[in-house]
Image (cartoon, rainbow, N blue to C red):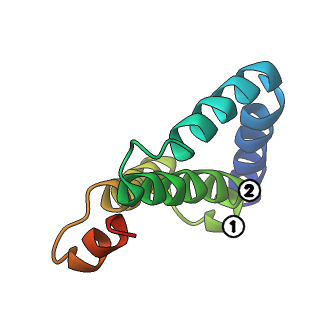
Amino acid sequence: MRGRQNNGRGIAAVLFQRHDGDHEEIEQQFRRILGDPAIPARDRVRLSCALGALLSSLMTASDLGDLSLETYGDLLREAITDLLEPRGDVSRAHRADER
């Protein structure tokens, strides 16, 4: 289990430290999208939530050391897909677009 914790920390460290210039460019692209009123508010909020879920899950991957990387990846993709492509009643989200 300790090896998995180190792997999770190592993955996060590589993702956050190796490509600082790339990260800045990606961050600026996200900021442009999130600040663009031409994009529906519902979509911008969901994108923001998905980004937050992705980043926080990468930082806490070591805390889920009992999961295989494959299982973790599958569950992470499922969660983010649910944020971006909601299922069921979304009527409240549509009202948010009217604001």
Residue with the most extreme front position: 99
SS label for mark 2: helix
Q: Which residue is mark 2?
A: 5
**CB within 8 Å, label 1 to label 2:** yes
The answer to whether residue 16 is left or right of residue 57 is: right
Q: What is the distance, in whole Å, between disc 1 and disc 2 at their CAs?
A: 7 Å
Mark 1, Cα crowd under 10 Å, few <14 / some 14-19 / many 20+, is: some
| Rendered residue at 64%/51% (across/down) | 55
| Rendered residue at 79%/20% (across/down) | 21
Q: Quadrant of the C terminus?
A: bottom left
Q: Amino acid at mark 2?
A: Gln
Q: Which residue is mark 1?
A: 63
Query: Residue 98, how many percent across, how many down?
Result: 32, 68
- Judged by depth in the image, the label closer to the viewer, 1 or 2, is 1
Query: Residue 9, how many percent across, how many down?
Result: 77, 48
Relative to 90, say whether 52 is above or below.
Answer: above
SS label for mark 1: helix
| Rendered residue at 29%/75% (across/down) | 95
Q: Amino acid at mark 1?
A: Asp
Query: Residue 42, how many percent across, how many down?
Result: 37, 60
| Rendered residue at 58%/38% (across/down) | 30
Disc 1 or 2, which lies upstream in sequence? 2
